[in-house]
Amino acid sequence: MKTFCGRANPTTGSMEWLEEGEDYDYHQEIARSRYADMLHDKDRVSIEAKPFRMGTILLLSCCSQVFKPMANAAVKIVEKNGFSDKIKVINKHSTEVTVGPDGDMQCRANILVTELFDTELIGEGALPTYEHAHKCLVKEGCEAVPHRATVYVQLVESKRMWSWKKLFPVHVEAEDGEKILVPPSEMENCPGVPSVCDIQLNQMPSSDFTTLSDVVTMFSVDFSKPVQSASTYYRVQLEPVKSGKAQIVLSWWDIDMDPSGMINCTMAPYWVKPTSALQWRDHWMQCVYFLPKEEPVLQGEKLYLTACRDEYSVWYNLQKAREGENKADEEEHKADVRVESPVCRCRAHLLWNRPRFGELNDQNRTRQYIKSLRKVLKTDSVCLCISDGSLLPVLAHYLGAKQVQYFILFFRANHLEDKIKIIEARPELLQPSHLEDKKVSVLVGEPFFTTSLLPWHNLYFWYARTAVSAHLASDVTVLPQSASLHVMIVEFQDLWRIRSPCGICEGFDVQTMDDMIKDSLNFRESKEAEPHPLWEYPCKSLSDPQEVLTFDFTKTVPQHCLSTEGSVNLLRKGKSHGAVLWMEYHLAADISVSTGLMQMSNERGNCEWNPHCKQAVYFFSSVIESEILSDPTAVTYAINFDTKTGEIAMDFKL
């Protein structure tokens, strides 16, 4: 049986379905499962084990997903650890488990053991799964492990996080005075998309947000009692501790493993429990929720924060109390609560993800493009822009361009209907009539394309530039004029754990699972880079950044592959976990923008990464054991850019 997988094609800028062998899906699921990350969470696995040491009669591990390879591994691990006569693995969705003399279970369980949570707590279907388990699989009055979960919230103001939802006005100094690019009213009033923004909040500097309220409990769920999954809402009263603009609700949860709450696991960020040692984890992080609109609040005034939820997601609303409000008024407020999930009305939140909003709001980055455009644009320039949902066409118009493609909402909001032309054709289908029979004198791109997953996928700009070659003037200016691929060897503070074997976990030998994951990684993944937003995952550079490949956009894509071999000298001692790769775009002779490294401390090697882009990480399989490099050495590399597929193959050796 063949498997068809969606994959970005950098040569066309499209998502395409590729036929893979029958083993592909199996190995991909295992290689990307991140089970090791969960077992490396010592806080989590140790506290999950403690209640059982007090004595257990019957256990039910209630799963929301069915994955045969992991079930088979569980059977082998149970056998290897001598528990075959005590533990039965049932490879079924819990809603399909039967109870009775001929069923999967002889009788209902009196202890319910589960791990169904994601960063939002309920996003993996915990509520309907618990609801069914209480109705069909466990006894009345059963004990659940975990026993309860509590969700906490805090109201904050943050220009940085708010920039992930709203587009800010852009100021452009033109020859005829200042121009202001404004977002359309549809976008200003749009509630956005309901999906949670989950991030490593512990990497967010305190200077990037202002807390407007204390931390308050939003709601709790007792898993030992019947659970309701139907849509509902919870409401708490807040009094701001500081005046400001209420924009963001930060949220996290903790779980009590036992009824007394003595055994607790918390996702609280660093400023909530500053004296506690933080346990790193990538499977449970913290939540950022965007209020439907910015709300000015005053210190001490009475506010109501409402959390609405359905079976799988949560969203928030903020209301101000009416002056002189009494109990009856509060009940009226409750009646006003809308439980419907927010829906994007402006389409921008469907086109751009949150990092993209942040990128478009990055004033320093925008200034680099404006500075570059000023260098190349003339009053008679015919300008063509190739990028998805870009502001460059409007910037180019304000600075002197004639013809571009553009996202239509901004096009209308800034009264540019007769100034900028939308070309609704793929580059290879461009006709002279689209350009009013004129040749393009300036071709521009950020470049950015929504289908790109890895840094070099935005090289689609090069392929598009090649496709429109016949429509370019002989002296055309291309911006950016070139790009380069860079690499650096790093030691990760924690990210290495997602690829590290577990060995022994709470006394259990899980080598079987380690071997299974290793085999699947070797199927393909171990030779591929994967995207990660490294601003969330601290690392230390063990080498200087090194340019390894260049791409000349002033010329068409060559027919032959671009290959390079070389070595990167390790300048600092440390654990060489992998190589980080990113692109830099050279807009003009002295102006470049980086999608990766922004700054590095030469003394310690601490890195500052572009917060709007994901960087490519190639994990070294040979240093999974984290060997300390005590002598000066180098990492050799071989990198090949296949111009037919637009993909980059790489290999690194110590």
Image: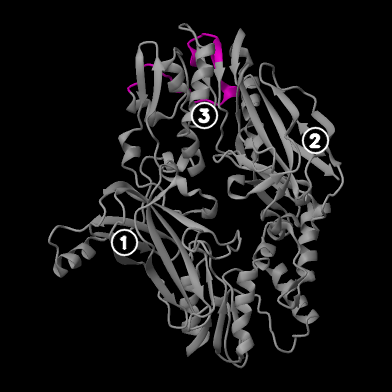
Residue 449 falls left or right of residue 79:
left
Q: Are marks 2 and 3 in contact (CB under 8 Å)?
A: no
Quadrant location of the N terminus?
A: bottom right
What residue would you read off at disc 3? 365
Q: Secondary structure at mark 2?
A: strand
Q: Main secondary structure of the magenta part?
A: loop
Q: Position of residue 122 (x, y in %)?
A: 47, 66
Answer with the quarter of the image where residue 596 lies: top right
Q: Indicate yes or no whether the magenta region holds residue 426.
A: yes
Q: Position of residue 571 (x, y in %)?
A: 79, 40
Q: Which residue is identified by label 2? A: 639
Q: Is residue 426 above or below residue 243?
A: above
Label 1 element class: strand
Snapshot quadrant of residue 448: top right
Residue 208: percent from left, percent from top:
45, 45
- Mark 2 closeness class: few <14, some 14–19, many ≥20 residues within 10 Å: some
What segment is highlighted magenta in the picture? 415-442
